[in-house]
Image (tube, rainbow, N blue to C red):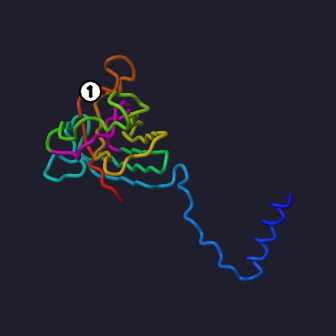
Amino acid sequence: MRVLVALVAVGLLSVACGAPEAVPQPAAPTPGAVGVRLSGGGALAAPAPKASAVAYNARLAPPGASATLTAESGAVLATSTLTVGGLLPDRTYGAHLHVNPCGAKPEDAGPHYQHAHSHASADNEVWLDFTTDAHGAATATAKQDWAFIPGRLPRSLVIHAKPTTRTGAEAGTAGPRVACVTLAER
C-alpha cells in the first residue's frame, strides 16, 4: 500500500512540477494493418515485352477480358482480392499468386508463391479460384493468417484453366496457365 501511495505521489508531483510529458510511442502494428500493398491488372492482351496483363489462351481469356488484383498484408494477416470480367461465362478457373512477373511464355511466372514451407496447400499459398457469372465476371477473395514478407513478395497472379485440386498428390494444380497479371508494390 505504501509503495502505491508513493508512486501516485511521485506521479502527482511530476505533473505539478511540470515534468516533461511522455513522448508518445508508435502504436504496435495491429493485425490487418497495411504493411505491404500489391496491385496489378487491366485488359488481358497478347504477350508482349513488359506487358502487365497477358492472355496466353484467347479461347479461355478472349479479347476484352480483364483481371485486377489487390493484395494487402499487415503484421499478421494478408487479404487478396481478384476481380475479372469478359472471361467465359459460367466457368470455374483456378488462380494463384506466383513468384515471378508475367512474361511472354506462361511458365515465366514461375511456381506458386509459398509462405512458409514447400508444399501446396490453401494455408501456405494464395488460391483465388472463381466461377464466372453469365457475363464472364467474378470476384474472389482469399485471407491468410500470415503476412507477405518484404523482399520475398509474390510478383504475379496466374489464372489457370481448371479449379485448384485441393487434396492428394495433385494438390495445388489447376491446369494450363490461361492469363497472367504482373504485380507491383504500391
- Amino acid type, label 1: Gly
**Residue 41 appears in the rendering:** no
Q: In terms of image quadrants, where is residue 123?
A: top left
Quadrant for the N terminus, please: bottom right
Q: Residue furthest right?
A: 1
Where does the image place residue 4, in percent across and percent down from the top left?
81, 61
Task: State the residue position of label 1.
Answer: 175
* Labels in figure, total: 1
Q: In terms of image quadrants, where is residue 63?
A: top left
Where does the image place residue 66, in percent across and percent down from the top left?
31, 47
In the drawing, does residue 176 fall left or right of residue 22? left
**Residue 128 appears in the rendering:** yes
Q: Residue furthest front?
A: 2
Magenta span includes 90 = yes
Label 1: state its secondary structure: loop
Pick the front one: 93 or 32: 32
Pick the front one: 5 or 142: 5
Quadrant for the C terminus, please: bottom left
Q: Badge 1: how crowded within 10 Å, few (<14), some, or many (20+)?
A: some
Q: Residue at x 30, y 51 (%)?
A: 183
- Point out the stretch of residues depicted in magenta: 85-103
Q: Residue at x 33, y 56 (%)?
A: 185
Vertical placement of residue 74 versus 163, above or below: below
In the drawing, does residue 124 fall left or right of residue 25? left
Q: Residue at x 36, y 30 (%)?
A: 91
In the drawing, does residue 127 fall left or right of residue 8? left
Where does the image place residue 114, in percent across and percent down from the top left?
34, 36
Q: Residue at x 23, y 44 (%)?
A: 100
Vertical placement of residue 101 versus 15, above or below: above
Vertical placement of residue 59 versus 17, above or below: above
